[in-house]
Amino acid sequence: MIIAIDGPAASGKGTLGKRLAAHYGLRHLDTGLLYRAVAQAVLESGHALDDVARAVAAAQALDPTQFDEAALKSHAAGEAASVVSAIPEVRAALLRLQQDFAAAPPGAVLDGRDIGTVICPHADVKIFVTASSEVRAKRRAIEMRRLGQIADEAAILADIRRRDERDSKRTVAPLKPAPDAHILDTSDLDIDGVLRHAIAIVDKARSGAR
Ligand code: DC
């Protein structure tokens, strides 16, 4: 079984992906980490984020087993990822890795922006996770404070809106729900509630009903 989860920054899709994978005994790939790792490699090489040849080379050399997830999850890495992810050649270079991951048994949960539309258009279940930008900024601020970081909620909100705009307006694989995606608005749900709703969606889809 392949479950595709897409949604905007800080919508909780990563946490949901992890929990759904554990529930169904599937593997999980947070595809945002791929773009974050490409961006980090380009920056570490001292080149500009829009250096297409460098970014493609970084994408081709990625080894997800070596990811330092904590470092890649930084705010700066997310911003940088949003820039390299708009380069079509980078997206093309990461396509195969994601599709191979999805196809290997027993199946997988992938979360990102274009999983249901481009990477796995034939996924068994597609869920598009949304929440208002205010709710997402609040969640991100709480998470940062939990990690002992200083969080300016207004600045986070502005960043989230800028990232939404960049991710949805780009010409290649923009953030948008697949026509057959189930929309899951998590604005008024905690993670257990989100998981319950998602499991209900998956079970219903698997039983053939929609
Ligand atoms: O989900 P995230 O915040 O870790 O993603 C970081 C950036 O990577 C985001 O701004 C858009 C990009 N991204 C993408 O374009 N396609 C994906 N499948 C996943 C992430």
Image (cartoon, helix red, strand yellow):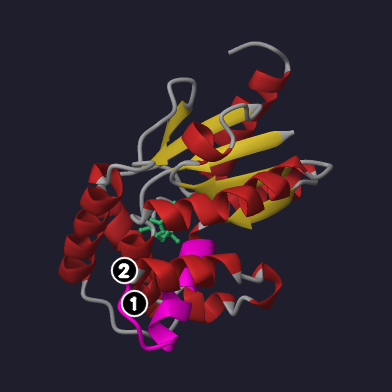
Q: Residue furthest front?
A: 53
Q: Is residue 42 magenta-colored?
A: yes
Read off the residue under disc 1. Answer: 76
Whether label 2 lies within 8 Å of ligand 1 gets the answer yes
Q: Amino acid at mark 2?
A: Glu
Element carrying mark 1: helix
Image quarter where the C terminus lies is: top right
* Residue 116 to residue 47: above or below: above
Q: Residue at left 17%, top 70%?
A: 155
Whether the residues at callouts 2 and 1 have beta carbons within 8 Å, the answer is yes
Q: Amino acid at mark 1?
A: Ala
Q: Quadrant of residue 141?
A: bottom left
Element carrying mark 2: helix
Q: Is residue 187 magenta-colored?
A: no
**Residue 18 seen anywhere in this rendered image of the structure:** no
Residue 64 falls left or right of residue 40: right
Q: Quadrant of residue 158?
A: bottom left
Q: Residue at left 71%, top 47%?
A: 100
Q: Residue furthest right?
A: 105
- Mark 1 is surrounded, within 10 Å at the Cα level, by few (under 14), some (14 to 19) or many (20 or more) other residues, namely some
Residue 84 falls left or right of residue 111: left
Disc marking residue 129? none
Q: Which residues are magenta?
A: 33-49
Read off the residue under disc 2. Answer: 79
